[in-house]
Image: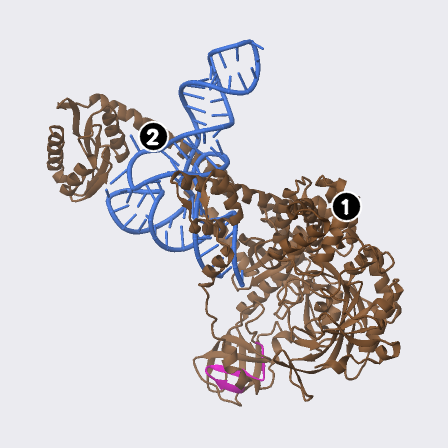
Amino acid sequence: MLEEEYQLEYFKKQGLTRKVCKSCGSAFWTRDSSREICGDAPCEPYTFIGNPVFKTHTLDSMREAYLSFFEKHGHTRIERYPVVARWRDDIYLTIASIADFQPFVTGGVVPPPANPLTISQPCIRLNDLDSVGKSGRHLTTFEMMAHHAFNTPSEEIYWKDRTVELCDQFIASIGGDITRVTYKEHPWIGGGNAGPSLEVLIGGLEIATLVFMSLGRQKTSSPGYDLNGEMYYPMKLRIVDTGYGLERLVWASKGSPTIYDAVFPEMVSNVMSSAGLSHMLDNKEYAKILGLNAKFAGLMDISGTNLFQLRKKVAAAIDVSPEKLDKMITPIEKVYAVVDHTRCLAYMLGDCIVPSNVREGYLARLVIRRTLRMMNELKIHEPLADLVEQQTKIIGMTGFEQDISVVREIIDRETEKYASTLERGTRIVQKIAKSYKTKSQRVPLSEIITLYDSHGIQPEMVRDIAIKEGAVIDLPDNFYSMVADMHSESKKEVAEDKTSKYSGRVNALPPTKKLYYEQSSDIEFEAIVLDFFDGYVVTDQTLFYPDGGGQPADTGTLVSSDSMVRVDGVIKIGEVILHHITGGVLRRGERVKGMVDEERRWSLMRHHTATHILLHAAKEVLGAHIHQAGAQKGSESSRIDIRHFKHITMEELRKIETEANRMIMASQPVEVSIEDRTKAEQKYGFSLYQGGVPPGRDIRIVKVAGDIEACAGTHCRNTGEVGVIKIIRVEHIQDGIERIEFAAGLAAIFYMQHLENIVISSSDILSVQSENLPASVSRFFNEWKEQRKDIDRMSARLVELEMQTLVAESIGGIAVVIKRIDLPAKELTSLAASVSETGGVALIAGTGDTVRVVLASGDSRVNAGEIISQVCSLLGGKGGGKPSMAQGGGPDADKLDLALKVGRERIIAALHG
RNA sequence: GGGCCGGUAGAUCAGUGGUAGAUCGCUUCCUUGGCAUGGAAGAGGCCGCGGGUUCAAUUCCCGCCCGGUCCA
């Protein structure tokens, strides 16, 4: 298909020949005329274990060797990007070096930061989480070293030949024998792009991939290619996208049994010691087994049940039982995984991820809990924070935005949280297991689903505890998919988008001139009507700000020579602004005068500028990880959601508020500029993208009191114009996200006046000065509690006294009291209860707004519940209770004597049987 | 954002449309040479907040607040 793509001049000149692998049938290029196999797994096993193919390098020395090699060959070295892809909204984590330049650079919208460039980009991929530690080669975190060249029609940097040549030369520079290298043809497709690609193999290991991204899904005039049923066409921009696995290069340079021993030997030995496994460190037997294990694992996918196959193979090779082998190496595999995961956490938390139950925060929590589980299994008692800090130090503190003390605090909190979830879970499961055991029933599936769904308890844990408690439980294999099915039932429909309805008509119009940017403090303008349909007016220019960026649209009026209409909504479709009007019509070509509602506009601007100020103040008070998770501006109050790992305390809130108002009082100018995206990113970092990632080559940068963001909203001219910020409340809206609600400007003043009114009216009620309000309220509350107790005591005393005056008649040897006593319901009840406690029967009635009747029976023959309902129905009401105690009432007080008489008769009848 | 579970004594939790409970902890006393322990008595509750239904709500219904959890 793309065969001719691989016929490189360089291959011919260097004497490489194209061969077809005898094992898999793939084409590859080699200098070794006797070679018959492509050199890739599973065709060829690892041969470098025990026989390094490069000069020994550490991570740092290998990285430096690579970057300086490419620098020497005309590339500019670029600093790494964060492992959280904040410049993208389609992925959470940076998964490849090219991800740094997607979508704007690769889409040709923005020029690259340098061309050609070289970078070593830490990447995180959690797809093979289960294999980490077990396969000997999988990592969650790896550095993809790369050199990229971006070729345009006007500027050719270099393409395939030079890329392969540089690869050969680099391999030679680190002591590799290029006659052992094979280049395997491997057409590449991904993310809407495609192109030829070469896998670089040596010693059975793939150490790099050289991708020549040259095809895209967008149709061009050139003929296209059909790849897997999709058409791809040549792109204007052709990109050299290489990826050299730093860790793999280091592994191959050491020839150690696993990649883990090669990449982080200090941590492996630290964690081994903590787990009490240090005796295995220099054990040749273990090294041999682990090497074999990696070799076999290199030939297969070990996810799921395949792991058992791997065990069997390795066990057979060293002649022990698979069970014994499993026991021997499982703890070591866990150590490897712990080491890998802690490195992953150092990057995640160092780059300011806040663990939570959403997005990348969820991924961080997943890794933390997984690590804690394994540490627990290995009986490592060292705090996780210590291990992560060690990793941070090994990686080198520079390049991490987050303070290590915050990282530690986050981990400690997560550790505690996990422990309490487990503890709570254990108690709940024990209780449930016991109750089903006593009922001698199986624990039903519905119960297990509830435990998982509502309490986050893994079904495996339910099973373990249930067995311990002696309960029986059935756990289906497809448990998780059953839960997933249950959730998928409630899918919601997506509302129809207005913009798509009008886009055809609107696209024909010229872009609207946005006066609200240049003259944000003006409120009047003149314009010409370009179109009018469905209540929407489009003009050539406007001061009306449209809905967007969390800022609501302006309102106001449009006046023409013969009519005046109200603007009640403004939207933006593409570059055209549509005003929704009511109360009249406008004609195309008409001249109109527009007036924006001044107070509302100012209030919105103040709130918007205040949002930036608050975000900055929060960052100063709470730490580098503070990022906006959402915001909604209003004219009376606004809110900003920020990512934070714990509740914001009152003290912190006051500090943020004070800081924010200090920034206002400094009255610094708000600077707005249009800047080149790449340059802005390098100058200000990715914290630019707080409110999402805007499209386009140039982005609008707004600087407010030290806060720098890409923002399209309208702002005050200086921070002083905000006036004042008053925080109204802080709310914990979900795990890892705190919402601050606040008011700015006049709205803040109104809010404070409102608060003052509450205080004044409350103090008026108590006739105290505002200053004494808290003390008085607490005194009143305590007195109220004391008095309630007094009342309880007194009513108990009252009941006692009443008891002494009660005259009981004896019916069949049972003391029966039937009496009217005007006491509150509670006393009637305890009085009746006192009688029944001594075996008597008491029917007591009291009158108030309505009649209340209590019947207590100390004799099983008298069923209080039955009798009371009859008594109450005579009173025009209802009543009921237990056989020993019943209450009720009704409105007809004049029928009380009759009701008591009937009650008495029923009691006598019951006692006489 | 959607769903589910929960909020009762200092802690952990029962429970009920009809007099609010248990265990641990706390206080005092007794037992003992002292301690562990054992025994007895006692204090400690706006049954999360607001509204509704009811003769009666901690309990049922609705809204809110708070905590937990699963899924996007």
**Disc 2 residue type (three-letter):** Ile
Residue in the image at 44% along x and 51% along y: A445
SS class, disc 1: helix
Q: Is residue A138 above or below residue A805?
A: below
Quarter of the image with the C terminus of chain A is top left
Q: Which mark is residue A50?
A: none
* Structural distance between the alpha carbons of marks 2 and 1: 81 Å
Q: Which mark is residue A791?
A: 2
Marks 2, 1: nearer the viewer: 1
Residue A294 percent across, percent down from the top left: 73, 55
Residue A663 percent across, percent down from the top left: 67, 57
Q: Quadrant of residue A625?
A: bottom right
Magenta stretch: includes residue A395 = no
According to the image, label 1 marks what residue?
Answer: A285
Magenta stretch: includes residue A542 = yes
Which badge, 2 or 1, is on the more N-terminal residue? 1
Q: Is residue A142 above or below residue A14?
A: above
**Disc 1 residue type (three-letter):** Glu
Q: Seen in the image, is A594 located left or right of residue A783?
A: right
| Label 1 crowd (10 A; few <14 / some 14-19 / many >=20) | few
Using the image as rendered, state which of residue A806 and residue B38 is in the foreground.
B38
Chain letter for blue, please.
Answer: B
Query: Magenta part of the protein: which range?
Result: A530-543
Q: Chain of mark 2?
A: A
Q: Quadrant of residue A381?
A: top right
> Is the magenta region chiefly helix, strand or loop?
strand
SS class, disc 2: helix
Residue in the image at 76% along x and 83% along y: A4
Q: Seen in the image, is A844 located left or right of residue A475?
A: left
**Apparent colour of chain A:** brown
Q: Quadrant of residue A67?
A: bottom right
